[in-house]
Image (cartoon, grey):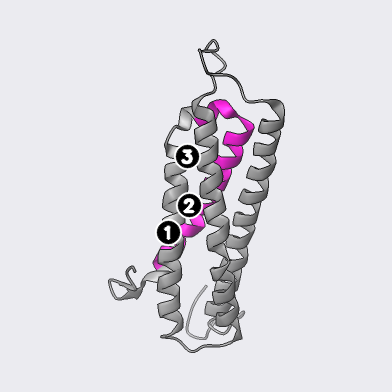
Amino acid sequence: MGPVLINGLPAHVLLVHVVVVLVPLTALAVVVSAVRPSWTRGLGLALPGLALVALLSVPLTTHAGEWLEHHTDSNALVRRHTELGDGLLPWVIALFVVAAALWWLGRGTPSATESVREGARPLSVPVRIAAVVVSVVVAGGAVVQVYRIGESGARAAWHDGYSAKPVSGHRD
């Protein structure tokens, strides 16, 4: 499905950075676009495009992570990280759907400087409120899930890989 090694390093260790950056960035863009519809028009296709790239990065990273899981010693921390990782895709799918919907809804709305064109009208207040609420819930869920996965991954990778005290022979 995707690379499992990049220059001899496990691809998961590298790809995870794409997810950690793009999912929160997409979440922020979605919320801002819901709150400020004029920004949705300014972003244009970049909003659903960013969400699509974030969406595609999740299964690539998960696939590489599953490969890595089968090539390391399994323990409860690794299994917990894997379970949490499997829960991200639905959140990012929802983030993509919301981004695409905001873009679609924003196409027909006039900007603040334009007069209302024939067939174009501003979104009603209930639709705007619903868009903001759904955006905040989906974006918040996605970001929280990324945090939980990252924290569990750090614990799995570093739980016995460092010392709180300097190792002898190393200077601070």
| SS for callout 3 | helix
| SS for callout 2 | helix
Q: Residue 47, which numbered label?
A: 3
Disc 1 marks a residue whose amino acid type is Ser
Q: Quadrant of residue 153?
A: bottom right
Disc 3 marks a residue whose amino acid type is Leu
Disc 2 marks a residue whose amino acid type is Leu
Q: Which residues are magenta?
A: 14-40
Q: Position of residue 143 (x, y in %)?
A: 60, 55
> Label 2 vs label 3: CA separation?
12 Å
Q: Residue at x 61, y 40 (%)?
A: 31
Q: Quadrant of the N terminus?
A: bottom left
Residue 6 magenta-highlighted? no
Q: Which residue is mark 2?
A: 22
Q: Position of residue 82 (x, y in %)?
A: 54, 76
Most extreme residue toward the top is: 115
Q: Nearer the viewer, residue 53 or 68?
A: 53
Q: Going from the N terminus, do you reach mark 1 or mark 2 first? A: 2
Q: Is residue 170 left or right of residue 80?
A: left
Q: Is residue 65 left or right of residue 158?
A: left
Q: Going from the N terminus, do you reach mark 3 or mark 1 first? A: 3
Q: Residue at x 58, y 19 (%)?
A: 121
Most extreme residue toward the front is: 119
Q: Which residue is mark 1?
A: 57
Q: Going from the N terminus, do you reach mark 2 or mark 3 first? A: 2
Q: Is residue 78 above or below residue 33?
A: below
Q: Nearer the viewer, residue 118 or 45?
A: 118
Q: Is residue 134 left or right of residue 27?
A: right
Q: Position of residue 146 (x, y in %)?
A: 57, 61
